[in-house]
Image (cartoon, helix red, strand yellow):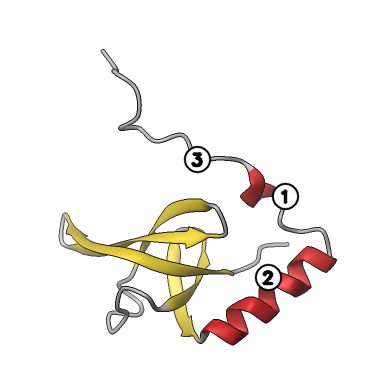
Amino acid sequence: MCLAIPGKVIEIVTREGLQMARVQFGGVTREACLDYVPETQVGDYVLVHVGFAISRVDEEEAKRTYEALAELDQLGELDIPEVSERAGGGA
């Protein structure tokens, strides 16, 4: 089953003509496309499905969703830390 997960927008940038955001899901940060919700601003909560923000939600709805997913033991993937491409020296 595929779920949309709520996250908090912490940064918005335009990349190759697409409005993109860094979205925080608990302690994990991922990138998501904002083209479906262009009115989104930093600090807003969005539902993200396969890399696309598909709607905005308020903070209370995001909290309720996290609590429900935690009860169902469905947040395991978010416990994995993101490996940044910018981290480390690289070649």
Q: CA distance from mark 1 to mark 2?
A: 12 Å
Q: Residue furthest top?
A: 91
- Residue 16 vs 83, above or below: the answer is below
Quadrant occupied by the C terminus: top left
Q: Are marks 3 and 1 in contact (CB under 8 Å)?
A: no
Q: Which residue is mark 3?
A: 82
Residue sitting at x 71%, y 56%: 75
* Count of numbered tags: 3
The image shows residue 25 at horizontal and vertical percentages of 54, 60
Instruction: Give the residue type at disc 2.
Output: Tyr
Answer with mark 3 or mark 1, whichever residue precedes in sequence: 1
- Residue 68: give x, y in percent of width and height: 77, 74
Where does label 2 land, which residue? 66
Q: Earlier in the sequence, mark 2 or mark 3?
A: 2
Report crowding for label 2: few under 14, some 14 to 19, many 20 or more residues within 10 A (C-alpha).
some
Quarter of the picture containing the N terminus is bottom right
Q: Secondary structure at mark 1?
A: helix
Residue highlighted by disc 1: 76
Please state the horizontal and vertical placement of residue 11, each as a whole percent of the image.
29, 63
Question: Does 33 sit left or right of 76 as displayed?
Answer: left
Give the SS element for disc 3: loop
Give percent across and percent down for residue 89: 29, 18
Q: Is 82 rendered above or below residue 25?
A: above
Distance of mark 3 from mark 1, alpha carbons? 13 Å
Seen at 68% across and 76% down, the residue is 65
Judge left or right: residue 55 versus residue 43: right
